[in-house]
Amino acid sequence: MLSKGFEVEIYTSTPEGDIVGLSDKIVSELDGFVREPDSRNVEYTTPPCHRYERLLCDLVRPRFRLRQYLKQLGNYTLIPGSTLSLGGSQQFHRSDPGNPYHSYIEQTYGTRVVTASIHINIGIYNPEQLLQACRLIRLEAPLYLALSAASPFLDGKATGYHSTRWQLFPKTPQSVPLFESHAHFIRWTEEQLAAGTMQNVRHLWSSVRPNGDRRPYNLNRLELRICDLVIDPVALLAITALLEARLLQMLENPALDPLLLSELPATTRSQDLVALTDENEMAAAKLSLDATLRHWKDGQPILAHDWIESLYQEVWSTAKQHGFSCFLLPLKKILREGNEAQRWLKHYTHEQDVRIVMQEAIRQAELQELALQDDLCHPLVA
């Protein structure tokens, strides 16, 4: 099994759903939490580990500590979702006014970056295998967005997108190729830094990127950045299990490379695959599991739901061989009942009130985390 870890961005709010900026207090008082440019959300990172059981506790425990701390501050909680669902997108709330990089982000992108998400990191230490993994997963990243979509609202209204976050998010630089090798990634990154299209090595905001301690030279993990905040830890582990099983499948079958297997014209294959996946990302942001995508193998249309179902069947034996197929099972529930955005929109159709939908989401998320904490993660050291 591969090592896995998460970067979790999450908003703080009142139980009524009004998002409140508290990151300055949280970061100064709680170990393990860091600022985002806007004070209304905070981030914590789980350490890399191999076992899903441990990963579940690593996800839940920091949130439980954070919830306890928020109750000390007042009547505050955590809110699901990846956008400012009930309002506040007109103004940036700086968490660190003296930070020049934060100034650049605010001036360049505004509140389009004030989102909450999950970044899934999977350890791969061979740089050429890592770049191959990035090629494969970039072309399948829309499937993970379809599973995780959780931002159908903005400023108190339904936007028409299941992932408003990814529809709004300023992917940077605007044009990112499929990296054919580690040398290609190094050369391209150096060119972007020299041209100013990237402010630093972290300023690569695409659906997938190679990551490591000294980018672009020393790399050790794939970072999937496209997912909305998956508040349900069990669902997040299922999405991660699908990703890990696909990567293990690739590592066991080196020919599993879109640049080799795609039937698109060889002379323009790389560019055509980038264009295809960009279109698929926007389609998945719009309709998630109900989106019609184009498969990278042959360019033919396929429903996101059906592609995920096919991929699930394809990687099941790999996951079973490595002992974690049981963690794939919750994907069946997502495919059957819908992702978070789809369930919220169904509730919204009945209530016609975004605030009621989000208040119920807040309540359900807290109840679920308390149950998981009690069942799996005792004793808690505060």
Image: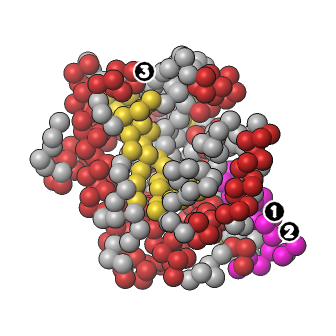
Residue found 30% across the figure and 33% down from its top: 31
The residue tagged 3 is: 21
Using residue 299 as the reference point, say whether residue 312 is left or right of it: left
Asked which secondary structure carries label 1, the reply is helix
- Tags 3 and 1 touching, CB below 8 Å: no
Residue found 40% across the figure and 63% down from its top: 3
- Front residue of 61/189: it is 189
Marks 3 and 1, Cα distance to the nearest angstrom?
42 Å
- Residue 265 within the segment the image draws in magenta: yes
- Front residue of 210/329: it is 210
Q: Is residue 207 visible?
A: no
Q: Quadrant of residue 158?
A: top right
Asked which secondary structure carries label 2, the reply is helix
- Tags 1 and 2 touching, CB below 8 Å: yes
N-term mark: 3 or 2: 3
Marks 1 and 2, Cα distance to the nearest angstrom?
6 Å
Q: What is the quadrant of the N terminus in the image?
A: bottom left
Callout count: 3
Q: What is the three-letter code of the residue carrying label 1?
A: Gln
The residue tagged 2 is: 268
| Crowdedness near tag 2: few (<14), some (14–19) or many (≥20) residues, C-alpha within 10 Å | few
Q: What is the three-letter code of the residue carrying label 2?
A: Thr
- Residue 167 within the segment the image draws in magenta: no
The residue tagged 1 is: 271
- Front residue of 317/133: it is 133
Q: What is the three-letter code of the residue carrying label 3?
A: Gly
| Residue 200 horizontal/vertical position (percent) | 65, 39
Marks 3 and 2, Cα distance to the nearest angstrom?
47 Å
Magenta stretch in the rendered image: 261-284
Q: Is residue 130 visible?
A: yes
